[in-house]
Amino acid sequence: MLYVSTRNHGEKVTASQAILKGLADDGGLFVPEQIPKLDVPVSQLADMAYQETAYEVMKLFFTDFTETELKKCIQNAYDAKFDTEEIAPLKKAGDAYFLELFHGATIAFKDMALSILPHLMIAAARKNQVEREIVILTATSGDTGKAALAGFADVEGTKIIVFYPKDGVSPIQQKQMVTQKGDNTFVVGINGNFDQAQTGVKEMFSDQALAKEMAAAGYQFSSANSINIGRLVPQIVYYVYAYAKLIHSGGLSDGEPMNVVVPTGNFGNILAAFYAKNMGLPIGKLICASNENKVLYDFFTTGTYDRNREFVLTSSPSMDILISSNLERLIYRITGDNAEQNLAFMKSLQEKGRYEITDSMQRQLSDFYGNYASEEETGAAIQRIYAESNYIIDTHTAVAAAVYKKYREETGDHTKTVIASTASPYKFTRSVMAAIDGNYGSKPDFGLVDELESLSGVKVPKAIEEIRTAPVRHKAVCEVDKMQAVVKEFLGVQ
Ligand SMILES: *Cc1c(COP(=O)(O)O)cnc(C)c1O
């Protein structure tokens, strides 16, 4: 299986090369030449552990990895870092199943892919005779940075440097990052916003002189960004796993369709569900849930993608996005894998901030349903599900639950449905508690954590317990124009 860029078919690379590169040289995203079909029957998957399911999915995409290499990556990723052997448990509440993707080290769904990416990268580096140490550079608005730090901490042959806006993340997110352990981890607050952090990192990636200096010192930059195919493929696994578990428990009968609802930002998670469907998994509708940054809702309803609008700060910050990078892979697909046509759309997005797809492309989107939830509807979903089922969900998952309610009311479709539950409510305690009862507002963060524990009956996760008392290990702060100097200093490059 080879991978091509969504913008040009000239370059074909292996899976391991695609993982190492992250982005194609032409700025496109790597996609497999064809989407492979699952080659084990669901009845057999039904009895498999998460790790076994992971192997059955990943072996079809990462074909230049040996069985031993791939299984080792999987064992190193999905181990006791997760607080349940099920890795991704399903909880029924009301009229849906919640697929809890937040049992990893940082209690958000980014762990599902970022706990395996470092191992895939190291195996890929060996395979391609990369001798230099890999330095992961990341800018984060909160969740990705911590999940990448946790994934790469103490992984031999790697270092990771994370930049975050010093005054632009939640107190819990900041504490999670600055207490990160691991001798190969570096965390820096910048006196600037997320966009400036992101721009600074992008400049370092494209700086050829810097790359040469790094190479001479034995280093090479790489990215843990969500467009890396090494993050997308591991996300397909849990949709296959969820379906198989519902077969196992009798919640579904073999072949019966399952709808999925995904709270969406960069379009990575829902794209993985789309790939799962194309692999032959009986998924019915792919329900794309947005918050008030509803670019995707507008896209699905009108066929026009338009980022020219006000950016709204919401209580589901990981979905506050106006350019959903992974959507490019879907656009490419519905052009009939036409790189040239896709490139024209992406150019238009870059130059005008918008593009309009053709009618025939739009007809191929019938598997998708898009809608959005306002802040009020999001809070109401948290409150309703707590009142009805005594189950507390986070703000991102609540966006999905609110959209699912609209979908049912609009369509009357009662197909069994799985909602991707992307963060623990403990990660967004303040907003969650405020939704349940407005009177919680004035308490300090950790006081609210204890309240949440007594309301939900769910034990405070280790990830939160640890940061209560963990010492701060990273105190570095820098100006935006000093990011490169800081990287050199960390790496001892003069
Ligand atoms: C990143 C994130 C999302 C959005 O996922 P995408 O793959 O970017 O669409 C949703 N919820 C949480 C909690 C996240 O961290």
Image (cartoon, rainbow, N blue to C red):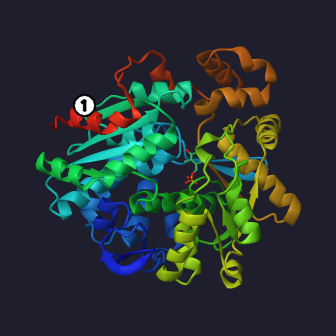
Residue 312, placed above or below residue 452: below
Image quarter where the N terminus lies is bottom left
Residue 280 visible in this rendered orientation of the protein: no
Which residue carries the number 1 mark? 183
Residue 307 visible in this rendered orientation of the protein: yes
Q: Position of residue 413 (x, y in %)?
A: 82, 66
Q: Which of the pair 400/166 is nearer the observer?
A: 166
Looking at the rendered structure, the secondary structure element under dot 1 is loop
Residue type of the residue flagged with mark 1? Asp
Q: Position of residue 312 (x, y in %)?
A: 69, 43
Q: Position of residue 270 (x, y in %)?
A: 59, 61
Q: Residue furthest left?
A: 216
Residue 179, placed above or below residue 88: above
Q: Residue at x 19, y 63 (%)?
A: 127
Q: Residue at x 78, y 37 (%)?
A: 379
Describe residue 218's horizontal placement relative to residue 333 as left or right.
left
Describe residue 441's horizontal placement relative to residue 29 as left or right.
right
Residue 190, placed above or below residue 350: above
Describe residue 322's horizontal placement relative to residue 482 as left or right.
right
